[in-house]
């Protein structure tokens, strides 16, 4: 096998993800959001009043990543967290008025980002479709065993 980094799907996904997130950073810094906070807010603008576990599942984020992110959004008065009185283990996430208003400020961000990508719309649509299929097809339960390396 001949190793070439540019022929590795994992590298292309990684490098493109980093590049796109760098572009988002330039757009999100002025409104005080990180990329992960931004996608969290999008999920809440789509559907307000979700549990932490629902949100984590939708965003593919574990609680170790999501909890500090939600604490920061709460300290910035964009969301509020409320323990469910019937089940203390469940925490509800709700947008505040400021969090809801931020959706209007952020609504042009996807269009502004697209201006930084020199890709025909038909290719962008095809890429979206392929990445959607990839996301849906990855099997988190896939049993990959650790292999012992022999020199």
Image: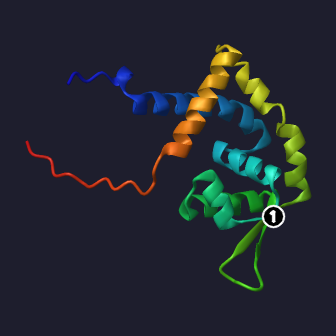
What residue lies at 78% left-to-right and 26% top-to-bottom?
111
The image shows residue 135 at horizontal and vertical percentages of 55, 42
Which quadrant of the figure contains the N terminus?
Answer: top left
**Which residue is most to the left?**
151
Q: Is residue 79 depicted above or below 150 in this figure?
A: below
The image shows residue 93 at horizontal and vertical percentages of 76, 65
Q: Nearer the viewer, residue 139 or 70?
A: 139
Q: Is residue 92 depicted above or below 60 in this figure?
A: below
- Residue with the mark numbered 1: 49
Which quadrant of the figure contains the C terminus?
Answer: top left
Q: Is residue 22 visible?
A: no
Hey, which quadrant is residue 55 in on the image? bottom right
What residue lies at 72% left-to-right and 38% top-to-bottom?
29
What residue lies at 72% left-to-right and 23% top-to-bottom?
114
What residue lies at 60% left-to-right and 37% top-to-bottom?
132
Left or right position of 22 against 99: left
Left or right position of 59 against 91: left
The image shows residue 80 at horizontal and vertical percentages of 80, 66
Left or right position of 47 against 14: right
What secondary structure is found at the residue carrying circle 1? loop
């Amino acid at each position: 096998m001949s190793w070439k980094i540019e022929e590795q799907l994992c590298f292309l996904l990684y490098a493109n993800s980093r590049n796109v997130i760098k572009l988002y950073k330039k757009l999100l810094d002025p409104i005080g959001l990180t990329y992960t906070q931004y996608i969290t807010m999008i999920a809440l603008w789509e559907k307000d009043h979700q549990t932490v576990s629902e949100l984590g599942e939708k965003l593919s984020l574990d609680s170790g990543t999501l909890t500090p992110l939600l604490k920061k959004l709460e300290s910035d008065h964009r969301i509020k967290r409320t323990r469910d009185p019937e089940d203390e283990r469940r925490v509800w996430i709700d947008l505040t008025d400021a969090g809801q208003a931020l959706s209007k400020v952020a609504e042009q961000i996807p269009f502004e980002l697209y201006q930084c990508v020199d890709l025909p719309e038909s290719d962008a649509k095809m890429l979206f479709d392929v990445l959607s299929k990839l996301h849906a097809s990855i099997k988190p339960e896939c049993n990959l065993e650790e292999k012992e390396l022999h020199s």
